[in-house]
Image (cartoon, rainbow, N blue to C red):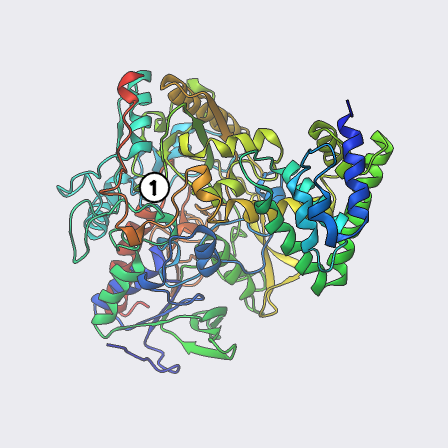
Amino acid sequence: MKKISDLRLSRRDILKTGGGTLVAMTIMPTGLILGQGNAWAAEAKALKPQTFATLIQACRDIYPHDHLADSFYAKVVMGFDTAAMESEDDKSLFEDGVAALDQSAQNAHGFDYIDTGWEIQRVEILRGMQEDPFFQRLRGTLVTGIYNNPDVWPIFGYEGESAAKGGYIKRGFDDIDWLDTV
Amino acid sequence: MTTNFDLNDDGVVVVIGSGAGGGTLGSELAMKGVKTVILEAGGRHEINDFVNDEWGMFGQISWLDKRTTSGEWRVARDFSGLPAWIVKAVGGSTVHWAGASLRFQEHEFKVRTHYGDIDGANLLDWPIDLAEMEPWYDMAEDRMGVTRTHDIPGLPGNNNFKIMKKGADMLGYKHCHTGRMAINSQPRDGRGSCLQIGFCFQGCKSGAKWSTLYVEIPKGEKTGNLEVRPQSQVLKIEHDSKGKANGVVYADQDGNQRLQKARVVCVAGNSIESPRLLLNSHSSMFPDGLANSSGMVGKHYMRHMTGSVYAIFDKPVHMYRGTTMAGIISDESINDPSRGFVGGYEMETLSLGLPFMGAFLDPGSWGREFASAMEGYENTAGMWLVGEDMPQESNSITLHDSEKDQYGLPAPNVHFDDHPNDIAMRNHAYAQGAAIYNAVGATRTFPTPPYPSTHNLGTNRMSDKASDGVVNKWGQTHDIPNLFVSDGSVFTTGAAENPTLTIVALALRQADHIAAEIGRGNV
């Protein structure tokens, strides 16, 4: 049986072939479908596809919500890509930041960040960079990019705007029904 | 009806700021027949402009001008450019306030007497007491429509309150109810009753919550004696050769500088901007700033001991539904030094929407521990802890050496260190808050650090003596008889209670005094 890290290595090789063929080629001969996140790398316009895919993984590792699809993290990374298109400084921030992640991962595990198979290992790498402007940009943007995304709210049980619906006076402001059992 | 006063009209009272202090004072003066101009730095956003959107409203109404921070408080690290979470708009922070309207307790006006000499704190008794304030509190409660006063029933309890109440009962607390809130529980004063919308901090869409924006100021304007000029940032208070205030320089909406002449000037820009304006108004006659012969302008910045406790349960809570802060436990607000600190604190229900929860639950935190806490959002209950903090001279608003605002004036630096008493109180409050939720079966509780300051107090403090305070018992500066301070910066000490009711009561009392002094020809 192949180790996860070997599969990840394959994924990196696929990414290196460029964005256009990504979606088809992530379906491996073994029938395994690798992380959908990499499909989003095709969206990269200013950033390298591998950078784009690595950022999605790093974003998920920063705020890991297993019940959120990659699309929510990809939306944030698309914002980084747009910023990179508009600013050489931002482009360098992300490209250099991912290069530093990869270097750190190579030193520790012999793989690039995205191919480092276990979350605990990747988080350790992030932990070592958490004071850097690159990390702070990712985390700071994610705070609103994830938790201020109205499409995310129902998944967390938050209902958003209420005045247009007449508030909660007739919609459950006091509907808690389990306190008597405490 | 729109009234316009001439820039050269030197018979007007100029009030700087339109929040709880300035908005109340200006409107009350107008109703007493005094010609008044309120200069407000922010824009005028009416109820129709409010949106149930935490970050959207934050961007629309918050005071986001250049500010810096220093000191050991965690806000300086997490929100270095945002020491205070207050409003820049007509209505000031009464647009986003929660509505909690509590009187100070008798001993809280006389803490030097009751607490003694606390190392590192400059405790001082107020030059007024509860008996003197009672009629003004009564008038303020009536105007604001405070629940549980004047035969106004309490608000109904929401889910977040019901959990607090259950825990309070189980711990044996005796004083837990849905609060004294300046939010209509029934139609009153031409405004409807609370629709349990939530989003109290984003501006009340129903108008059930009292705000100077749509309650006081329109009444003042209706008299024809009040003009409110929005987008008018005051830069400097001018004085004549005798040292009396005679006008203010402000930047209008187009950035043009204007000079409004004045008979009396009242400063009500909240506890960062008010001392900053006095300091920035230095002149050859007053080289250390106006009203600063004591050196106390900007000193003794207080922000209340604050913190929050959030708890996750195994079943849904939906804490964000309904009135944000209609729930209180007052048992810990007493002064009982056997707990390891002087003064006391209130416990009040609080909820944040998912967007603010992400930013404030544990600022800067990330990873699976944080993410799993966020995933408990639907099952989360929350409370805010607010108590008396110690006035320390080194906690202060000062003018920054190099950083400037958009008008080229020195930006304010806000320096704050917790006093050991503040820390002991916060730790006690965290433990009690967690105990309340654990009693109701919480599966996980979190101590959340203080948010950027919403209660900013004490930087022009009131004292009988001109040597250790900036204003006298009327809020009149000791140095300049026709210069007044009319906001929470006059607080000698902070007490445990949310400050707005006291600011409004002091403003009503000050309006009475200023009108009488004008009548007597003294100012």
- Classify residue B100 as left or right of residue A8: left
Furthest toward the left, the residue is B151
Which image quarter is the N terminus of chain B in?
bottom left
Q: Disc 1 residue type? A: Thr
Q: Is residue B229 left or right of residue B214?
A: right
Choose between B502 and B245: the one closer to the eye. B502
Q: Which of A65 and B479 is in front in this view?
A: A65
**Figure quadrant of the C terminus of chain B:** bottom left
Spot occupied by residue B422 in the image (x, y as percentages of width and height): 50, 31
Judge left or right: residue B380 versus residue B224: right
Residue hosting label 1:
B324
Does residue B385 appear anywhere in the picture? no
Query: What x and y, as percent, mark residue B448?
Result: 50, 33
Q: What element carries label 1?
A: loop
* Residue B222 place in picture, x, y as percent: 21, 71
Name which residue lies at 71% across and 50% down.
A52
The number of discs equals: 1
Q: Give the residue displayed 86% in from the left and 32% down from the top.
A: A110
**Nearer the observer, A141 or B182:** A141
Tell me what residue is drawn at x 46 percent, y 49 percent.
A150
**Residue at position x 58%, y 59% from top?**
B66
Image: A154 above or below A32:
below
B442 on left or right of B277: left
